[in-house]
Image: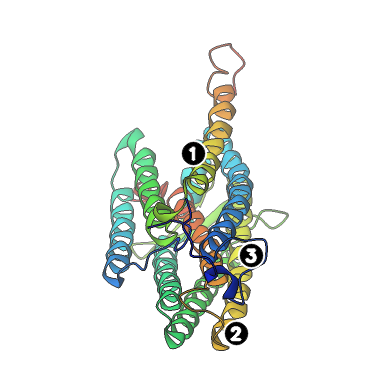
């Protein structure tokens, strides 16, 4: 089966509905979790759920799992560069106290 | 990689001359859309970076200001967008299996869900204007709320205007993307109406769907970061 002849095979409606229900359930979980105090962990939990939801959308609704390796590399590179932005950006702010610069 | 029988690729009227096969043409469109979406990731990424820096600088203002937002309307809007993503993907599927009615019904539903999102957003914005939570000369740090039937007064911490600036810029740009998306869907709907898409040719509807899902993903991050971050402090 050549990937170029039919980039996206027809996916069953059942699978799409399953992903849809999962997204709604995760939305419910993120609201429920936000209502409880987990101290420092509230934001990491919320982001973990958001990343899971985004991955479901990218893989199933946007169908990246059926795309060519080239497209996959572009998708991963996009998010990777975003983390470079956050990583280098915050490596400045989060270390200011260490060198006595304050906020 | 691509095995194509000679002659097959010469016949489809929608096959551009510089492509080898319909599949290659579709994959090229998808790749092109993703390259655009990567620039969108960086575009919204700059705003998320500003959000991180100022939340780090004004953690209290972020928590208290976040509690001024309506979690229920934000949650409903999240669900509305997820519904629109389902109908979008079903519209693409309808094109793949050659159902014109399926495309039309699902595209109209997508447009309706997208519009419902914007209507709810309108009511949220209107309430922020009423409560003087729009940054600028009329911003009020003193907020009045009714908690368990008792009128209470609270003062927002320093830095709250920054939270609301980012709230309006991030959700505003997201809403602008929704408006563009709805416009895109109207164009695609017209093409589907004319029966332009089928199992061999559905690139435009697929690629527009990628854009629609991307806007959904941005909201998936905006909802917890803006609405939910101080939810448990509101008790």
Residue beneath disc 3 = B176
Mark 3 and mark 2 on one chain: yes
The answer to whether marks 3 and 2 mark residues whose Cβ atoms lie closer than 8 Å is no
Q: Are marks 3 and 1 on the same chain?
A: yes
- Quick check: A33 above or below B108? above
Which residue, given by chain and number where applicable, does mark 1 sit on? Answer: B60
What's the CA distance linking mark 1 and mark 2?
A: 49 Å
Name which of mark 3 and mark 2 comes first in the sequence: 3
Looking at the image, which residue is at 57% across and 70% down? Answer: B204
Residue on which disc 2 sits: B190
The disc numbered 2 marks a residue on which chain?
B
Q: Earlier in the sequence, mark 3 or mark 1?
A: 1
Q: CA distance from mark 3 to mark 2?
A: 22 Å
Question: In this rendering, is residue B117 above or below B41?
Answer: below
Q: Residue furthest right?
A: B137
- The answer to whether residue B151 is left or right of residue B48 is left
Towards the viewer: A40 or B158:
A40
Name the residue at 33% across, 65% down: A20
Circle 3 crowding by C-alpha within 10 Å: few under 14, some 14–19, many from 20: few
């Amino acid at each position: 089966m050549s990937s170029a002849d039919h980039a996206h095979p027809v996916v069953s409606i059942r699978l799409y509905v399953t992903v849809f229900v999962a997204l709604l359930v995760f939305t419910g979980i993120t609201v429920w979790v936000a209502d409880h105090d987990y101290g420092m962990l509230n934001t990491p939990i919320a982001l973990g759920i958001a990343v899971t939801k985004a991955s479901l959308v990218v893989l199933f609704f946007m169908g990246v799992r059926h795309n060519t390796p080239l497209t996959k590399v572009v998708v991963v590179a996009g998010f990777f560069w975003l983390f470079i932005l956050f990583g280098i950006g915050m490596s400045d702010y989060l270390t200011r106290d260490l060198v006595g610069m304050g906020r | 990689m691509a095995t194509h029988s000679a002659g097959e690729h010469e016949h489809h009227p929608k096959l551009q001359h510089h492509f080898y096969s319909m599949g290659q043409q579709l994959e090229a469109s998808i790749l092109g859309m993703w390259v655009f979406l990567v620039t969108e990731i960086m575009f919204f990424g700059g705003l998320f970076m500003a959000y991180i820096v100022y939340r780090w600088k004004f953690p209290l203002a972020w928590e208290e200001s976040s509690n001024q937002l309506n979690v229920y309307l934000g949650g409903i809007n999240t669900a509305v967008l997820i519904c629109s993503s389902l109908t979008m993907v079903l519209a693409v599927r309808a094109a793949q299996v050659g159902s014109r009615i399926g495309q039309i019904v699902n595209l109209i539903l997508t447009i309706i869900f997208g519009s419902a999102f914007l209507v709810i957003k309108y009511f949220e914005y209107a309430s922020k204007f009423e409560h003087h939570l729009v940054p600028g000369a009329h911003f009020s740090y003193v907020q009045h709320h009714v908690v368990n039937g008792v009128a209470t007064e609270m003062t927002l911490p320093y830095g709250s205007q920054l939270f609301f600036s980012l709230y309006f810029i991030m959700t505003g740009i997201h809403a602008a993307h929704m408006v563009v998306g709805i416009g895109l869907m109207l164009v695609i709907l017209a093409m589907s109406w004319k029966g332009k898409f089928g199992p061999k040719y559905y690139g435009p509807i697929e690629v527009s769907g990628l854009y629609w899902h991307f806007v959904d993903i941005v909201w998936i991050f905006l909802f917890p970061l803006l609405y939910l971050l101080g939810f448990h402090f509101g008790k």
